[in-house]
Image: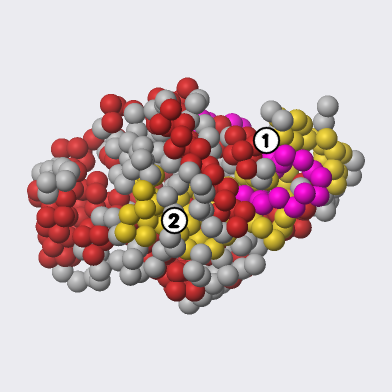
Amino acid sequence: MGRKLDTTLGRIEGIEDRGLLAFRGIPFAKPPVGERRFCAPAPAEPWSGVRDASAFGFSAPQNKAQLDALVGMGVGAQSEDCLYLNVLTPAADGGRRPVMVWIHGGAFTIGSGSQPMYDPVPLALRGDVVIVTINYRLGALGFLHLLDVCGEDLGTSANCGILDQVAALRWVRENIERFGGDPQQVTIFGESAGGMSVGTLMGTPAAKGLFQRAIAQSGAAHRVNDRDSASEVASLVLDAFEIDPRDAARLRDVPLGRILEVQAKLVASYKRHDALRAFCPAVDGRSLPESAIGAIRSGLSRDVSLMAGTTRDEWKLFGLMDPKSRELDEAGLLERVELHLPGDEPARRARGLIEAYRKARGGRTGIEPPELFYAIETDRVFRMPAIRMLEAQSVHRPQTFSYLVCWEAALLNGALGACHGIDVPFVFGSIGRKGAQKFAGSGPEAERLSARMMDAWIAFARSGDPNVDDLPDWAPYDSRRRATMIFDRECALDDAPLDAERAAWDGLL
């Protein structure tokens, strides 16, 4: 039997799901279609009668991903009409429970809040918390910066996908009390591009006050484009459709399939920074007036408690999709590292960085060119941005905590190490699922680690402090001690882990 309740937009009817109440496919903004394509989200229209909230809404349009074969990656039906969220609650009883809002990952081009890998039931049951999962626009539809190329004609924003997230958080603030949640105890959390979204939201003025806590998993506040880079991408998209910037309104009429086709080609070929940045948040001077990390350093989110961390071997998962990386020699390693280093004399900087990593890792782990490349990319893309965000926020907020996941994936007999995404099944309590077992492993040690991580995440959402009885004392992060919780078969608090590698980035990132 369904459960009905009222929202600010109308009445909905959800379903019972394994001892919880589930309300799915709730619109939080107008469909961004037709004249609203490439526009910032607008408030959803009210409805009459009772809206069925038993099924997920459409996922954002996206291309097929290389990792789709992994169990739990399916996104279901897709449409530009994709701005929906889902609420899972122990009871719609005015209980004022902590609220955890999950922002999915996927390089800002794939993913959905309805993916089975993000099933929130175990986490909600364990913690008596309300969990919200959201969709947001992806790829060109969510992150195309048209303003500087095309002017005001389209009413464009570079960061529609981030503004979608802000709109979802506004819906949470206005409605979540009706679902048994506390609008003053909202934690945003996400992994990969979801973690990068968390970092971006901490630097977005429009999001200020909409959340009180933030957990950034394998993503932080550096993954933004400057205006010139974002405009370059927009020009390439217009050129692909043979559209003059003065006639940019024609973009509204381009078939969705063509947009996805051009998007895929551009992601594959865009080399100015790296493929992950063809479509991502941009400093547009409006929704994001400055870089997210700059805003955090300035104290924009000084009232937000932060927990951030990465896995030890993030890039080994991406190496699985990059066969050439497994065959790198010294020259190839130097060329790849040099490509992504900022500043003058990139070759000299790259040689220095490689040598620092070889010295730091010697006798501890592999120093062959592929292993060094994975370690350097792990830190460039994920660990160093997390450290920089922790450094910036800890100045303003003592409730700032760091972690490092060192549990090694079972897939491919451990060849992936503690790779990107290994934390997700532990945080969501899905370690017992067949697909998760194949990826992450199983057994009593895995189950205990999952319990510890779930409890820490829940404790943080409840109080801003992740300390729980079954973990060592977890000290806050500061730039002197750099206290970091190690999540592995045995958990421990380590001061400044992998610090020689960290120090090698001083002056580089």
Residue name at image x 54 percent, y 63 percent: 305
Q: Is residue 329 left or right of residue 137?
A: left
Query: Based on the displayed image, in which of its 4 quarters is residue 122 positioned?
Result: top right
* Distance of label 2 from label 1 (alpha carbons): 38 Å
Q: Residues within 10 Å of mark 2 (few under 14, many from 20)?
A: many
Sequence-wise, which precedes: disc 2 or disc 1? 1
Q: Are marks 2 and 1 in contact (CB under 8 Å)?
A: no
Q: Residues within 10 Å of mark 1 (few under 14, many from 20)?
A: some
Examine the rendering and report whether any part of residue 252 can be seen.
Answer: no
Q: Residue 327: percent from the left, percent from the top?
A: 15, 38
Q: Secondary structure at mark 1?
A: loop
- The coloring applied to the image is secondary structure
Q: Which residue is mark 1?
A: 56
Q: Is residue 109 above or below residue 349?
A: above
For the record, the magenta segment spans: 72-101
In front here: 108 or 367?
367
Q: Residue 281: percent from the left, percent from the top?
A: 48, 60
Q: Residue 500: percent from the left, percent from the top?
A: 21, 60
Whether residue 504 appears in magenta in the rendering, the answer is: no
> Which of the two marks, 2 or 1, is nearer to us in this view?
2
Whether residue 75 appears in magenta in the rendering, the answer is: yes
**Residue 450 bears which disc, if any?**
none
> Which quarter of the rendering shows the C terminus?
bottom left
Q: Which residue is mark 2?
A: 474
Q: Please, what is the three-letter code of the amino acid marked with disc 1?
A: Phe
Residue name at image x 48 percent, y 54 percent: 216
Query: Based on the displayed image, in which of its 4 quarters is residue 249 positioned?
Result: bottom right
Q: Residue furthest left?
A: 330
